[in-house]
Image (cartoon, rainbow, N blue to C red):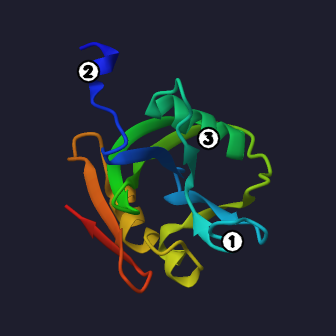
């Protein structure tokens, strides 16, 4: 199909691609980033590692780049799901979710915040990004033969996030 036939235009719903990586160790801990106090989004909250997919990258390249930039680590990454975040009638966010294992490298400090290996059973005691309570157990349990995790996040009129998974 020629480029001109791709059907991209101002009246189409546009999507911003992002990735989110959760790396697990052999002790069933997950590496999370507690957002720096001056961070625009999720300050003081724990979240996975991730960011935008840049031009010219596929989703795996972007996930590997973000993991290395924010942690200094490389890992075996497995694509395990996708979440659509409905932001407006014109634009949404597509989050590509990866599960990582077999880390190599030295954990480096991140300007994004504080990196910590967290036991899964300790998550309920920590300030986490609101969707992790439902997303992280799914990612932790995911294996290569399991169906992909498919999620849809929508903002309610009062600004709260509604999370659903298939």
Badge number at residue 43: 1
Sooner in the amino-acid sequence: mark 1 or mark 2: 2
Q: Is residue 45 left or right of residue 161?
A: right
**Place of residue 160 in the rendered image (x, y in percent of width and height, measured from the top left):** 42, 81
* Side of 113 where 98 appears, left or right: left
What's the residue at 60%, 68% (across, down)? 46
Q: Quadrant of residue 71?
A: top right
**In the rendered view, does 123 fall on the left or right side of 154?**
right
Q: Where residue 91 is drawn, which disc sits there?
A: none
Q: For the residue carrying disc 1, how many other residues have a C-alpha within 10 Å: few (<14), some (14-19), or many (20+)?
A: some
Looking at the image, which is closer to me, 55 or 65? Answer: 55
In percent of width and height, residue 129 lies at: 53, 72
Q: Is residue 73 visible?
A: no
Tell me: residue 94, above or below residue 79. Answer: below
Label 3 or label 2, whichever comes before in sequence order: 2
Q: CA distance from mark 3 to mark 1?
A: 18 Å
Q: For the N terminus, which image quadrant?
A: top left
Q: Quadrant of residue 10?
A: top left
Quadrant of the rendered image containing residue 166: bottom left
* Residue in view at x 73 percent, y 65 percent: 39
Cα distance in 3D space between marks 1 and 2: 42 Å
Q: Secondary structure at mark 3?
A: helix
Q: Which residue is mark 2?
A: 5
Q: Residue at x 61, y 34 (%)?
A: 65
Q: Which residue is mark 3?
A: 66
């Amino acid at each position: 199909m020629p480029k001109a036939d791709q059907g991209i235009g101002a009246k189409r719903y546009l999507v911003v691609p992002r990735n989110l990586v959760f790396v697990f160790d052999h002790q069933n801990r997950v590496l999370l980033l507690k957002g720096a106090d001056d961070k625009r989004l999720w300050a003081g909250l724990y979240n996975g590692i991730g960011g935008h997919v840049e031009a010219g990258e596929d989703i795996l390249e972007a996930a590997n780049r973000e993991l290395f930039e924010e942690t200094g680590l490389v890992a075996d990454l497995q694509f395990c799901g996708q979440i659509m975040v409905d932001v407006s009638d014109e634009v949404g966010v597509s989050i590509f979710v990866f599960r990582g294992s077999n880390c190599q490298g030295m954990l480096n400090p991140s300007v994004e915040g504080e990196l910590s290996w967290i036991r899964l059973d300790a998550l309920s005691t920590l300030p986490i990004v609101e969707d992790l309570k439902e997303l992280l157990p799914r990612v932790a349990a995911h294996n290569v033969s399991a169906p992909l995790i498919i999620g849809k996040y929508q903002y309610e009129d009062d600004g709260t996030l509604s999370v659903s998974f298939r």
